[in-house]
Image: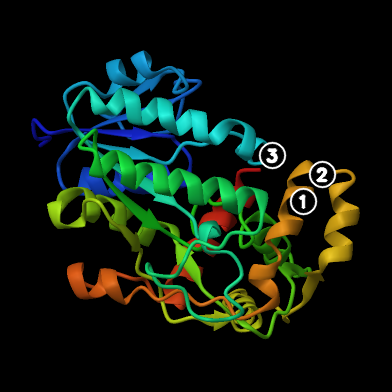
Amino acid sequence: MATTQQHVILGTGPLGQSIMRSLLKRGHSVRMISRSGKANVPQGVEIMAADLTDAKTVAQVTKSAVAVYQCAQPAYTRWPEEFPGFQRSIVEGVSTSGAKLVVAENLYMYGDTNGTPLTENTPYNAHTRKGATRAQMSLDLIEAHKAGKIRVTMGRGSDFYGPQVKDSSVGERTFGPLLQGKSAGAYGNVDLPHTVTYIDDFGEALVILGENDAALGQAWHVPNAPTLTQRQFLTMAFEIVKHTPKLTVMGRMMMRIGGLFIPEAREMVEMLYEFEKPFIVDDSKFKKAFGDHSTSIREGLQQTIAWYQGELQHA
């Protein structure tokens, strides 16, 4: 039975859906917000359409919430131009309700650490447009918290994979061809370690952060399974579907050529440094504070593959 606690999720994509599942397991009342007001959700989950660039609208749709989970974003190609204002509107709106704001982030703000594992204390040294945008947005959140404007915490995940995840470095370009026995897409140097985040681990972590006042005013790397190389990750996936491993590796030149036709590919070029050196995320801070709920890579792959197989059957 649902409790009287109202939780609001901004965004109805794979991460929003994962947060929803974690909240429903706890018996909470869930409202999800998207631009269209449409999403495939269980009965009892409220869906609302709203313009999140308008602070007054944000205040209205988050009124009475105990926690608001921010995992909505503008188009990937429009981050520097639109994302900062988008988030400012959300902070302004949520600040009127007194709710906690739990913000989903990636790891772009750290920049190129030359293979040194990332911790929450790693300096922000972004050298890319999207990294600089993310860094400033994170700093703004902490400043708003320190000023007493809003209670906020941030959960940071790496490239994520899992059911419903398509737009990711380990998304549709990987699992679509893999299931058909074709070459799975990969990037940079496939024999270097690269941490990935299972989508349901990300969602669960954000809910845990929202439950704990000790998480406020800080950033947290969400729990991940032990880091593998891209080749190890994809070889395991091919073994599960009993196909011979085949990879199509995209480097900078190929991405630039693809970017002539695909805007998202063009935007990916500046982030390829994450795949050209070891990219390892240290999540020990979260695990020490709140425990380790990470899903093993094999189990995560099995769940992901099962979802993609279901999609192919209904295509």
Circle 3: residue type: Thr
Element on which disc 2 rests:
loop
Circle 2: residue type: Ile
Q: Quadrant of residue 256?
A: bottom right
Percent coordinates x, y for residue 117 in the rendering:
48, 79
Element on which disc 3 rests:
helix
Residue drawn at the location 61% of the way across and 74% of the way down: 241
Percent coordinates x, y for residue 227 in the rendering:
49, 80
Q: Is residue 235 left or right of residue 249?
A: left
Give the label, 3 or 1, closer to the camera: 3
Query: In the image, which disc is placed on residue 77?
Result: 3
Inter-mark Cα distance, 1 to 2: 5 Å
Query: In the image, which disc is placed on residue 265?
Result: 1
Which of the pair 195/100 is nearer the observer?
100
Residue 92 in view of the camera: yes
Which of the pair 232/87 is nearer the observer?
87
Query: In the image, which disc is placed on residue 18?
Result: none
Would you place residue 6 above or below residue 201 in this image? above
Which mark is first along the chain, 3 or 2?
Answer: 3
Query: In the image, which disc is placed on residue 262?
Result: 2
Q: Is residue 187 left or right of residue 140?
A: right
Residue drawn at the location 48% of the way across and 40% of the way down: 13
Label 3 neighbour load within 10 Å: few <14, some 14-19, many 20+:
some
Circle 1: residue type: Ala
Element on which disc 1 rests:
helix
Label 1 neighbour load within 10 Å: few <14, some 14-19, many 20+:
some
Q: Are marks 1 and 2 in contact (CB under 8 Å)?
A: yes
Inter-mark Cα distance, 2 to 3: 10 Å
